[in-house]
Amino acid sequence: MTFENLFGISAQVSVQAPGRVNLMGEHTDYNNGLVLPTILSQKTTVQLAIDPSADGEIDAFSENYQERIQRHLSIPLVGHWTDYILACLQQLNQRQIPIPSLKIFVRSTIPIGAGVSSSAALEVAVLKAMRDLLKLELSDVEIALMAQQAESEGVGMPCGVMDQMVSSLGQSNHAFFLDTQDLSFEHIRLPKNYHFAVVHSGKTHTLVDSGYKKRRQECEAAAALLNLSSLRDACLLEIEQTATLPDTLRQRVLHVVSENQRVLDSVAALKDNRMAEFGQLMNASHLSQKEQFEVTIKATDALWQAAIQSGAIGARQTGGGFGGAIVALVPGNVVPGWWNYVSNMCPEARALNSPQI
Ligand code: GLA
C-alpha cells in the first residue's frame, strides 16, 4: 500500500524519525537530570498532504495497525494511535498555526511497548513533517519540546524530554549526552569494536497505565521533603540527614542521585574507551533500577542475567521499565555466539538490532 494508492493524491512531504535506546540515565530526565541515549536504525515514516476537498478533517492511515480513520482536531482524544498525531497538531494549533485538512500515512519499524520510544518517534516525525509542509520556523529542539508536551498534555503520559530530544537530534553511531536541565547536549562517538545489543523481553509495557506516573510523583514528593525544586540538586549527605524522608522515597532518591553520577562516569569512560568500566556502570544501573527504583520485572532481570552470563561486559534495562527491553554491551569477538546463548536461556526474547558489528 502506498500513499498515492490509498488517498488518490501524492504525498507532499515524507519525514522519518528514529526510535532510541537509552544507554545510561533512567528516570533522571523528569528530575532535571542527565541521560545518555542513542538512536536505533528502526524508524517511523510520516507522509503528509493537504487535502483541499475535506473540511478540517484529519484522514490518517497506519500501515502497522492496518487502519484508516478520520478525525477532527476538536474531538477529544480517545486512547487510540491517532491521539499522538492529534496531540501534535493541537500543539501547533495552540501556537496559532492553522491546521489544514490532511491526509497522513504512517509506517513504522519500531516495536511498540518495547521501551524504545515508538511514540516519541511518531510525534517527532509528525511535527517535522508539518514543519516541512507549512514551512514553519521551528528548530529541532523546539520540535522535541512540542512533542514532549503533546505526549504529556495530550496523551497523558507525564514523560521527560529524553526520548523526543534524541529522536529529533540524535546521530547514528553516537551517544547523545543530554543535560535535561538546560538542554545542552554533546554527540559522543560509540566504539566500533563493541555492539550495544537491544533485546526485547517480550513483555510489553503501557507507560500511561504503569507505575511510571507513580515514580514521578514519588520523586516530586521526595524533592519537596528535601526542600529542593528537583532531585537534580539532591546530594547524598542531605538524604542521609533528612530523617523525615520515608524509606521508599529515600531509595528512589538514591537511585536518581547515583544514576546521574553514572551518566557522568559513563561519558568519561566512553570518551577514554574504557568499555569494561562502562559495562560495570550498566550493571550498577540495572541493580539500582531493580532494587532502589523498583521498575524492573522478572523477565528483564532474567534477560539481564542471561546477557552477562553469555559474555556481555554489562547490561541494563532500558526505558521507562515495567517491561520492555534491555541493552547489553557485547565485545565484537563475543557477538557471533552471544545471541544464541541468550535466546536459548530466554526463548521469549527478541533481538531488536542486528547482532553483527
Ligand atoms: C520513558 C520516558 C522518558 C524517560 C524514561 C525513563 O521512556 O518517556 O522521558 O523518563 O521513560 O528514563
Image (cartoon, rainbow, N blue to C red):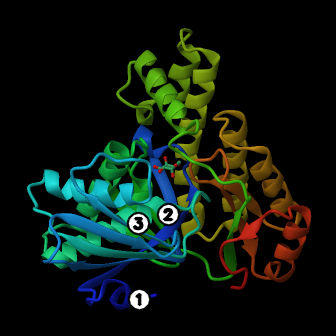
User: In the rendered image, which quarter is residue 337 located in?
Assistant: bottom right
Label 1 environment density (alpha carbons within 10 Å; few <14, some 14–19, many ≥20): few
Amino acid marked by disc 2: Ser
Between 120 and 252, the residue placed more toward the observer is 120
Tag 2 residue: 118
Mark 3 is surrounded, within 10 Å at the Cα level, by few (under 14), some (14 to 19) or many (20 or more) other residues, namely many
Dot 3: element? helix
What distance separates the C-alpha of mark 3 from that of mark 2? 6 Å
| Quarter the C terminus occupies | bottom right
Residue tagged by mark 1?
Answer: 2
| Residue 211 image point, x, y percent | 58, 35
279 with respect to 214 (left or right): right
Check the image and name the residue furthest to the top.
244
Amino acid residing under circle 1: Thr
Determine crowd level at label 2: few under 14, some 14-19, many 20+ residues with C-alpha closer than 10 A.
many
| Badge 3 amino acid | Leu
* Among the two numbered marks 2 and 1 on one chain, the one whose residue lies closer to the N terminus: 1
- Residue under the image location 39 percent in, 31 percent down: 230
Element type where label 1 sits in the image: loop
Q: Nearer the viewer, mark 1 or mark 3?
A: 1
The image position of residue 299, as x and y in percent, is 79, 51
Would you say 236 lies left or right of 95 here?
right
In the picture of the structure, the residue carrying the numbered disc 3 is 122
